[in-house]
Image: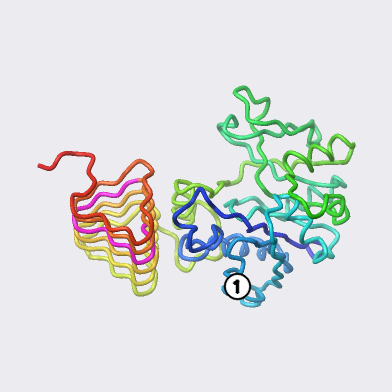
Amino acid sequence: MQDVEAVVLVGGKGTRLRPLTLSAPKPMLPTAGVPFLAHLLSRIREAGIRRVVLGTSYLAETFEEHFGDGASLGLDLTYVTETEPLGTGGGIRNVADKLSAEHIMIFNGDVLAGTDLKAVADTHRGAGADVTLHLVRVQNPRAFGCVPTDGAGRVLEFLEKTEDPPTDQINAGCYVFRREVIDTIPQGRPVSVERETFPGLVASGAHVQGHVDVAYWRDMGTPGDLVHGSADLVRGVAPSAALPGATGESMVLDGAEVASDAFVFGGTTVGRGARIGSGAKVEGSMLFDGAVVAAGAVVEHSVIGAGAVVEEGASVRDTVVGDRAVIGAHCELRNNMRIWPDVTLPPHGIRFSPDV
């Protein structure tokens, strides 16, 4: 992989994940004990790629503050900041002058995947392609645009969402470009690779190849996907070399306290200094550093922000609780609710069932 450099696009504002992304970019959210981006960078390193360019924008300084020059990861990291949103294609073009390898592997910074990156590069080289796309087969392609290919794997077209898709192959957010092809992307304006760059290349007769597999894949753009992706990492369903502990039903980080009779399972992460009280049940959830789940409380498939408190007997299901918020005793939250940072809900303040 010495002829390959990587670009990771991490400039998005992550609005679908608010309030979590009010204080951190989406790729920096704690996921199975480390920033989500650490999992992707570990896969890039394991594939044999050593030089990575990060295309940043929103809260750009947080990336370099955490990862530095990449030496601790065995990588050489370079940072390029967009001053205005440029889209996926524009973001790739914006980092072009930092790239020197023959082939450039591009990653969306919010995708959790398990594909063999060496195999994607081999497909690209073997086909002599201008661009190669990682395509993943999914059970419900109606939820995505799809990408049909011919018998040799060459991409035929790019289709929007439809009720009757002709293929189950979707764009998985990982691409390999020949370096010179990147220079053909217009500079200084927003460009969508899905709607402009790739269809334009196909129409011009360029060789756009597909690498198709059924590897693990999840877009981490919504709270539900973030929670389930983190749980899959903890349980070892999704691969990562960046986990700070062994895989299992839960990952309890340094300084956390879990009562001996608490039930913590389903791929839950218990952040540093977090506390779970007696008889509490925490399933498939993310407790950020310093979070508290009091005695008898129930937290299922939810995110409890840094320093947030779920008081005694409260029930939190499929919900995001922002940093330092307080969920009062015996409150009931569910159905994709979002509690903003520093909000305090009084005891019994929100309920879906009558008090007994």
Magenta run includes residue 242:
no
**Closest to the observer, 346 or 195:** 346
* Side (left or right) of 97 relative to 41: right
Could you tell me if residue 268 is visible in this image? no
Q: Residues within 10 Å of mark 1 (few under 14, many from 20)?
A: some
Please report the residue visible at 46 percent of the width from the left and 61 percent of the height from the top: 32
x and y percent of residue 87 in the render? 70, 50
x and y percent of residue 58 in the render? 60, 61
Q: Looking at the picture, does residue 7 appear above or below residue 220?
A: below
* Side (left or right) of 280 relative to 24: left
Quadrant of image for the C terminus? top left
Query: How many numbered marks are there?
Result: 1
Quadrant of res 144: top right
Quadrant of image for the N terminus? bottom right
Residue situated furthest left in the rendering: 356
Could you tell me if residue 276 is visible in this image? yes
Q: Looking at the picture, does residue 201 appear above or below residue 69?
A: above
Numbered disc 1: secondary structure:
helix
x and y percent of residue 97 in the render? 83, 64
Q: How is the image coloured?
A: rainbow
* Side (left or right) of 342 relative to 18: left
Q: Looking at the picture, does residue 111 appear above or below residue 152?
A: below
Residue situated furthest top in the rendering: 164
Please report the residue visible at 82 percent of the width from the left and 54 percent of the height from the top: 187
Magenta run includes residue 315:
yes
In the image, which residues are magenta? Answer: 304-317
Please report the residue visible at 69 percent of the width from the left and 71 percent of the height from the top: 77
Q: According to the image, label 1 marks what residue?
A: 67
Three-letter code for the amino acid on which mark 1 is drawn: Phe
* Side (left or right) of 277 relative to 343: left
Quadrant of res 329: bottom left
